[in-house]
Image (cartoon, rainbow, N blue to C red):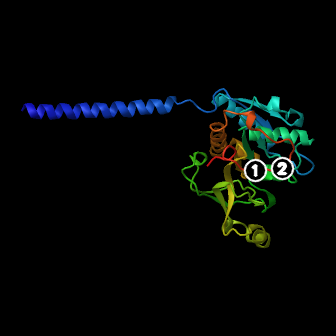
Amino acid sequence: MKSILLIKRSFVNALLFFILTVFVATVFAQTKPSPLKNIKVLVYTKNGKGYVHDNIAASVKCIQKLGVENGFKVDVSDDPTIYTDQNLKQYTLLIFTSTNNDVFDTDAQRVAFRRYIEAGGGFVGLHSVLGTERNWTWFKQMLGGTFAWHARHQKFKVKVIAPSHPTMQGWPLVSERELGDECYFTKEFYPGITVTMVHDLTTLDKRDSVEIKKNTGSFGSLFPAEWYQTFDGGNVWVTTLGHDKEYYQQPEFVTHILKGIEFIAGQSKNKDYTKAYADSRDMPVRYTKANFKP
């Protein structure tokens, strides 16, 4: 009888220990500080000569709302004179939302942007960011590529190929751009990027088949839509989705943007300007362990 009581007591103790462990782990997970708390981000919206997307105001409002809800401050500007070493130090990350063509006025501003990345700054690029600074090789490498062409606005499917990545949380493995979107084709891909989501080219309008084949290059039926990378000291996340301004009020897409910002913020809190080495916009990249994480 005594042995049975001892067994029961051991079982109860083990059960209580298990429950306590789960409770503590749950509380810890819930109280784990967000990488966004009390940080400051810059949303940059300047466009050079050429097409200007009508989604910019909606995307700015979306990010400002995310800032209020998640405890981070959002500055917004289309003034390239803000690009100085001293001013950029205050920001954990920069968000370029549907910027296009040349967005800097001087090479001194370009160098300041580059030095910010080299110091460990973060970068988030939304939609037409791929069309930004098309004549600056370093910037295109930092982005992961540059704009080539997009198919006509239409409904099409995208597929997640890195479901365990933080930016893919809450995003279905296969989904249709139900409002329609622009399937962006990229050229000059930088080989350091890691792709997380792809366009399913088989779901595009066959009337564009000639141009699709021309711009697909060596890819097959799947073409990169989103990716991230560590480049020259900085941390970068880019999505080509988000043409329609309505997406910036759609919960699923808004959460997706938040996950991208969180991912980059978590890696970019500690900047070190002693690692910023560029003294010209086209200075060769230093491929060292300090500048490129594994």
Q: Which residue is situated farthest in the left direction here?
A: 1
Label 2 environment density (alpha carbons within 10 Å; few <14, some 14–19, many ≥20): many
Q: Which residue is drawn at 90% across and 39% down?
A: 108
Label 1 environment density (alpha carbons within 10 Å; few <14, some 14–19, many ≥20): many
| Contact? badges 1 and 2 (CB < 8 Å) | yes
Q: Mark 2 points at which residue?
A: 132
CA distance for labels 1 and 2: 9 Å
Q: Is mark 1 on a helix, strand or loop?
A: helix
Instruction: From the top left corner, tell me how far across and down residue 113 is, in percent.
Output: 81, 40
Q: Nearer the viewer, residue 31 or 93?
A: 93
For residue 63, say whether it is visible: yes
Instruction: Say if 55 sits above or below 186 in the image.
Output: above
Q: Mark 1 points at which residue?
A: 143
Q: Which amino acid does label 2 sit on?
A: Thr
Q: Quadrant of residue 86?
A: top right
Q: What residue type is labelled 1?
A: Leu
Instruction: From the top left corner, tell me how far across and down residue 173 is, in percent.
Output: 56, 56
Q: Quadrant of residue 196?
A: bottom right
Labels 1, 2: front one: 1
Instruction: Say if 33 sits above or below 145 in the image.
Output: above
Could you tell whether 101 is left or right of 231 in the image?
Answer: right
For residue 59, say whether it is visible: no
Instruction: From the top left corner, tell me how far across and down residue 190 is, in percent.
Output: 73, 57
Instruction: Say if 15 sits above or below 128 in the image.
Output: above
Q: Nearer the viewer, residue 115 or 146?
A: 115
Q: Nearer the viewer, residue 133 or 270?
A: 270
Along the polypeptide, which appears first: circle 1 or circle 2?
2
Q: Quadrant of the N terminus?
A: top left
Q: Which of 200 and 57 is in front in this view?
A: 200
Q: Which residue is situated farthest in the bottom direction here?
A: 210
